[in-house]
Amino acid sequence: MGGGSEAGPDAGPAPRWLAYVTSGSSTPELRLLDVAAPGKPPVSLQEGAVDLRWTKDGRWLLAELYGKRSALIDFSASTPGPVLPLELAGAGVHGCVPAQSSKRLACLLDEGTAQAPALVDLSGAKPVVIKVTGPTFLASSYPFTGWSPDSRYALYLAPSGNAYQLLVADAEATAPSATLISSSVVGLKVSPDSKFLAYGVEAPSPGFFLRNLASGSSSQISGDPVSFWSLGWTTQGTAIVYGGAAGLVAYAPATAQSVVVHPGSVGTLMVSPDGTRAAFFAYGELAHTLLDTQFFPPQKLGTLPGTPLCWSPPCRFLAVLDAPLLSLVDLQAPALPPKALSSGNLPPSDCEFQGELGLTWYSHLGNPVLGVATSPAWEGTALDAKTGPFATATFSWSSDLALLAFRDADSGWLTLAEHFPNPTLVELTGVSASAFAFRP
């Protein structure tokens, strides 16, 4: 199979690990498959698994288990290490999310009647669980966790009516403690430099706030309860752009200055991963507008030939839907016409870039299909399979983008695609999988 690297003159190709969780009538379990060794049976790692994640450096495989429990498997050696349950004084740790640095996990500690925020230090030989003091969540709630871009601040969110309870903890503190930011958060975004947290609240009175994460001080920007889908930070945290009552507004923390970029009601705002461009839709307009957000205030660059679906990192390419076609816009060559990727029978509903070398999209209309296009030709290909909903881990790419694993919607089995742009398909599993991912 393509993409394997030699481990030594006699060792054969280095393992290319694909981890997956089985589903069906039998007890689900976490399995490991080496796709570089065709015919080699998978290895069973842990029963009772329900989900999995890899740390970005590929050292740790995180398994989410039944009963609010998590475990780690070390991949720093040539063979996977033993399963290490995560617990503190007998209490299970669960719901973990790795930081970008791969040095920590943000988790929850099951205390029976409550769930406390917790951190797991991965910088040593073995993981160390640390309880975060302060407010907790109800045992019946379903919190989830996240990180600031610099992997310093852990964020804990739990649903609270139509909003969220938000706690923040400094993971670099000697004795980490959580601070309750609000119990009615409806939108939030941490600045790219991790200095500020912008968040909208619903109660006790609507408002949009900016919190200095180092000092802990907060200031109100406006009386708008800004949602998750209508805010984004520009380059290096120069400004926060959001949709409010006045229209699309840009606010610069350094000068506390607000500027209305576009008056009137606006819809979803999409800021590029590097913060240099943004796209938004204004009600009453015929097309989405593209912004240059490198400077303050942002400047309009014109309109887009369709509805923006996803950006490439950092922001050279933008995939847009001009129904029923998915097209690629090259922002470094604005004079070139958009490159059509999908045919008329593949109207996409979601998409995701793999760096600037590949794009994967999902269509849920008619017969669901998975579409793929790779650089430099960007020729769209429809994989010969019915895939499940895009949002539930339909596919996983190998780190070199040579291999693509995807799940069939009817059987739930995993299939491997290789040799792009005209891929061949190989069946990987004879059982259904509920979650799966290549090792980074």
Image (spheres, rainbow, N blue to C red):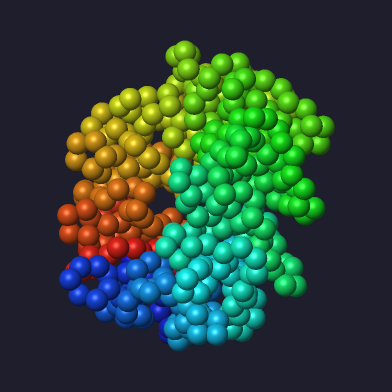
Residue 367 shows in the view: yes
Q: Residue furthest right?
A: 255
| Residue at the spot 38% in from the left edge and 45% down from the top edge | 360
Q: Position of residue 304 (x, y in %)?
A: 49, 22
Q: Nearer the viewer, residue 62 or 1?
A: 62
Q: Nearer the viewer, residue 349 or 165?
A: 165
The image quadrant where one finds the N terminus is: bottom left
Q: Position of residue 169 (x, y in %)?
A: 66, 61
Q: Position of residue 313 (x, y in %)?
A: 56, 44
Q: Position of residue 228 (x, y in %)?
A: 53, 39
Residue 356 shows in the view: no
Q: Horizontal placement of 327 versus 369: left or right?
A: right
Q: Is residue 260 shown above or below 27?
A: above
User: Which of the 4 image quadrants contains residue 56?
Assistant: bottom right
Q: Horizontal placement of 175 versus 333: left or right?
A: right
User: Which of the 4 image quadrants contains residue 248?
Assistant: top right
Q: Residue furthest front?
A: 204
Q: Nearer the viewer, residue 402 or 385?
A: 385
Q: Is residue 395 shown above or below 431?
A: above
| Residue at the spot 19% in from the left edge and 36% down from the top edge | 366
| Residue at the spot 64% in from the left edge and 81% down from the top edge | 124
Q: Horizontal placement of 37 versus 311: left or right?
A: left
| Residue at the spot 56% in from the left edge and 44% down from the top edge | 185
